[in-house]
Amino acid sequence: MSEDTSPTDVRTFLSILRTNAWWILLLSVAGAVAAGLLSYMQTPDYEAVAKVVVRPISSSPALEGIPESSLLSMETEREIALSPPIIEIASRSLPNSIGERQLLEHSKVEAPTETQVLQISFSSPVPQYASEGALALAEAYVGHRQLEAAKVIGATVQGYHKQIKQVQSQLAGRRRLLSKAGAGRKGQIQVQIQSLNTRLGALHGEIAPLLALQTDPAELLISETPEPVRTTQSPLASSIMGFFSSRRSLHGVSRCFVIHSAKDFANPACCDRP
């Protein structure tokens, strides 16, 4: 307070505050009620999360023993999980009220550090839609990973088949030569044929494990529909918090302006006490 402020001015100000104390209380309660009503009128929001374990896609035995985390880019997988192809596939299994645009705008994917887990979430005012949206996105991503794994294995098998055809063609040529060759060359050609047969057997041996390989590049941690969680504050909680906040403010004002003397009023710290 400035030195020019007289005690009379302070007493007048305190008198005005005491006179209007009930108005202050009324306005505070009205504000709390209005906040509660506004919260009640707001549409609640629910969020559901589906978790997916991601594993590397590889058909090469040379990569066995290498840590899976070093063969994966979880940041890349996070981007793929919300890519247009995944969104399009997921939207097909959802109600018509959830289009691709809404699915993209209300979805998010997180990849916790030092894990191979994607947390795929979807939010909606309807709890069931939140659960179905998160599950649809997760299943679409898992299906995409499985398809990519099948393509990698298919391409590898196709490459082996191409080599097998080449070796079989070479074998056919050597056998024709063997039937026409003289006694001096037959031994050499037979060695070549034996080498090609060994090579052919090795190629077939590479294909067999790939055909029997059970690829599991991504897996839902929980196959059931994820439980939605309300993310907006309940109207009752908002009302209670607003009311007690107003009570706290009024209590501070009362202590500062009504109960305390002019000397305390001149000390701004009195208003900071609960």
Image: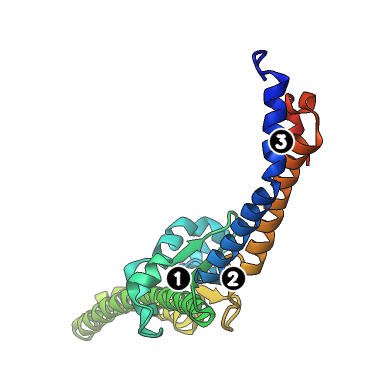
| Apparent side of residue 222 relative to residue 194 in the rendered image (left or right) | right
Pair 2/3: label in front: 3
Pair 3/1: label in front: 3
Amino acid type, residue under disc 1 in the picture: Ser
Q: Check disc 1: other Cα within 10 Å, few if <14, some if 14-19, many if 20+.
A: many
- Gap in Å between the C-alphas at discs 2 and 1? 43 Å
172 versus 22 height, above or below:
below
Q: In this figure, which residue is indicated by the disc labeled 2? A: 230
Q: Check disc 3: other Cα within 10 Å, few if <14, some if 14-19, many if 20+.
A: some
Amino acid type, residue under disc 3 in the picture: Ser
Q: Which quarter of the figure is the N terminus placed in?
A: top right
Asked if labels 1 and 2 touch by Cβ distance under 8 angstroms, the answer is no
Name the residue: 68% across, 30% down: 12
Q: Check disc 2: other Cα within 10 Å, few if <14, some if 14-19, many if 20+.
A: some
Q: In this figure, which residue is indicated by the disc labeled 3? A: 15
- Identify the element where label 2 is drawn: strand
The figure's colour scheme reads rainbow
Q: Position of residue 137 (x, y in %)?
A: 45, 75
Amino acid type, residue under disc 2 in the picture: Arg
Q: Position of residue 138 (x, y in %)?
A: 48, 75
Q: In this figure, which residue is indicated by the disc labeled 1? A: 59
